[in-house]
Image (spheres, rainbow, N blue to C red):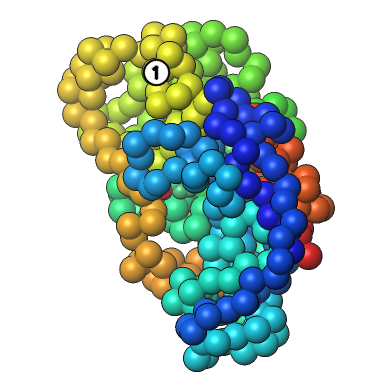
C-alpha cells in the first residue's frame, strides 16, 4: 500500500518537499476494524492547519505521520459487525491507497442513491458545513442579502444555493471570470464579484456595493483577507456572520503577519461589530455531527432532483495529491477537490 506523510512543516505556502510518498506492508484489521481500498479522497483547506505545529481545535499531524483526511472506498476485509467485503464506505482513511479504521468511525454509503464522491463534497462535510452555518448562525430571511466567498467551492456553492432557495439575494465572490460565470449560471447566484480583478480593498468594496446595493445581512465568512475588509463596512445593522474559514490567512502562520498587513486592525474591526450590532459566531462542523442526518434528509433530495448542483474537480493518482492540494489553496480548483486513488 502507499501513503503520503508529512515530511516537514511548511513555512508559508506548502511545497512538494513537505510531503513524502511511502510504500509499506498492507495493514491487517483488528477486532472492530475494517480494511478499505480507497477509491477517492478529499482534499480540504483545513488540512493546511494540520501541517502546522500550532494550537488549534485539532492536533497537528506529527512529522512522518500520514496526512489526515476523509475518503470513500470499499471494504476488502472486515472484523466489524455490519460491514462486509465490497461495502462502499466513508471514513477517516487519510492520504493513502488502503487503510484500516475503527468501523465506528466509518459510514456505509448507498451508491444507488448518489455517486460515492458526493460523500466528500455536496453531501459530505463541506456541504453540511454550508447548511449548518447558514441556517444556525446566518438565520437567513427572505428578502435579505447574503455574501459568500469561495462561491464555487463545496461550502460556498451550498450556501449560495440554499440562500437562493430561501428567497435571499445571493452574492458570490470568486477568483476569475470563469468561476464568476459558474457561480451565476450554474449555482444561480444573483451576482458574483471577481476578487482577483481588484488589487486594492477600495476597488473590491465598490464592486461589492454594486453587487449588493442594499447592503449585506449575512456574510458567510470563508476567506478573511481583503474580502473581509471590503465587506465589513457594508454590513447592515443586526447582520450575522457565520465565521467558517479564513483561507486567505492559512499560510500566515496562526494569523500573524498576513492579517495585520491587510490593515484590518483589532480596534477597527471591533468598532464595526459594535456600531452595526453584528453577531459573529465561529463554528467547527466536527462538533455538530448530530445534525448530519437532518442535513441529508433535507438536502439529498435537492441534489437528486437537481435543485442543488455541484461541481467536482478530480485529479488522478495518489502521488498527485500534494500538487492538487497546493493548487486548491491558491484557487486552482473548480468545485470540490478530490483525488481518484483506486
Ligand atoms: P474551496 O474548495 O472553495 O477551496 C478554497 C477556495 O478558497 C479556493 O478555490 C479559492 O477560490 C478561495 N481562496 C483561496 N485563497 C483566497 C483568498 N486569498 N481570498 C479569497 N478566496 C480565496 O474550499 P471549501 O469550500 O472546502 O472551504 C471553504 C472555506 O470553508 C475554507 O476557509 C475552509 O477552511 C472552511 N471550512 C470550515 C469548516 C468549519 O468547520 N468551520 C468546515 C469546512 C470548510 P477562488 O478561486 O474563488 O478565490
Quadrant in the picture for residue 35: bottom right
Q: 283 or 242: which is nearer to us?
A: 283
Q: Ligand 1: does it lie within 8 Å of the C-beta at label 1?
A: no
Q: 163 or 76: which is nearer to us?
A: 76
Residue 137 position (above or below residue 215): below
- Please give the name of the residue rendered at 23% of the width and 36% of the height, measured from the top-left corner: 279
Quadrant in the picture for residue 96: bottom right
Q: Is residue 54 visible?
A: yes
| Label 1 crowd (10 A; few <14 / some 14-19 / many >=20) | few
- Please give the name of the residue rendered at 40% of the width and 46% of the height, measured from the top-left corner: 59
Q: Residue furthest right?
A: 316
Q: How many tags in the picture? A: 1
Q: 334 or 319: which is nearer to us?
A: 319
Q: Could you tell me residue 112's position as x and y percent? A: 68, 81
Q: 336 or 158: which is nearer to us?
A: 336
The quadrant of the picture occupied by the C terminus is: bottom right
- Please give the name of the residue rendered at 69% of the width and 31% of the height, measured from the top-left corner: 17
Residue bearing mark 1: 256
Q: Could you tell me residue 334's position as x and y percent? A: 70, 42
Amino acid at each position: 500500500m502507499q501513503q503520503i506523510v508529512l515530511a516537514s512543516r511548511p513555512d508559508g505556502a506548502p511545497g512538494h518537499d513537505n510531503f513524502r510518498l511511502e510504500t509499506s506492508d498492507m495493514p491487517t484489521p483488528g477486532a472492530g476494524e475494517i480494511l478499505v481500498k480507497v477509491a477517492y479522497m478529499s482534499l480540504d483547506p483545513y488540512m493546511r492547519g494540520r501541517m502546522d505545529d500550532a494550537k488549534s481545535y485539532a492536533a497537528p499531524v506529527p512529522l512522518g505521520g500520514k496526512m489526515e483526511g476523509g475518503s470513500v472506498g470499499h471494504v476488502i476485509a472486515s472484523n466489524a459487525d455490519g460491514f462486509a467485503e465490497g461495502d462502499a464506505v466513508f471514513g477517516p482513511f487519510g492520504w493513502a491507497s488502503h487503510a484500516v479504521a475503527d468501523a465506528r468511525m466509518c459510514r456505509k454509503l448507498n451508491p444507488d442513491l448518489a455517486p460515492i464522491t458526493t460523500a466528500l463534497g455536496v453531501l459530505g462535510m463541506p456541504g453540511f458545513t454550508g447548511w449548518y452555518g447558514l441556517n444556525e448562525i446566518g438565520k437567513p430571511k427572505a428578502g435579505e442579502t447574503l455574501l459568500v466567498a469561495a462561491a464555487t467551492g463545496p461550502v460556498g456553492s451550498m450556501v449560495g444555493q440554499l440562500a437562493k432557495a430561501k428567497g435571499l439575494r445571493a452574492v458570490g465572490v470568486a477568483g476569475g471570470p470563469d468561476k464568476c460565470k459558474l457561480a451565476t449560471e450554474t449555482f444561480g447566484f444573483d451576482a458574483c464579484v471577481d476578487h482577483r480583478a481588484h488589487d486594492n480593498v477600495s476597488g473590491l468594496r465598490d464592486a461589492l456595493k454594486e453587487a449588493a446595493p442594499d447592503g449585506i445581512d449575512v456574510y458567510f465568512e470563508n476567506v478573511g483577507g481583503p474580502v473581509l475588509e471590503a465587506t465589513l463596512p457594508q454590513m447592515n445593522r443586526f447582520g450575522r456572520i457565520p465565521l467558517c474559514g479564513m483561507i486567505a490567512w492559512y499560510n500566515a502562520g496562526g494569523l500573524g503577519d498576513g492579517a495585520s498587513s491587510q490593515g484590518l486592525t483589532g480596534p477597527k474591526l471591533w468598532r464595526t461589530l459594535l456600531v452595526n450590532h453584528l453577531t459573529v459566531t465561529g463554528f467547527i462542523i466536527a462538533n455538530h455531527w448530530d445534525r448530519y442526518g437532518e442535513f441529508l434528509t433535507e438536502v439529498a433530495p435537492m441534489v437528486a432532483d437537481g435543485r442543488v448542483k455541484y461541481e467536482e474537480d478530480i485529479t488522478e493518482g495518489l502521488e498527485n495529491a500534494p500538487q492538487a492540494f497546493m493548487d486548491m489553496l491558491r484557487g486552482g480548483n473548480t468545485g470540490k477537490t478530490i483525488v481518484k486513488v483506486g
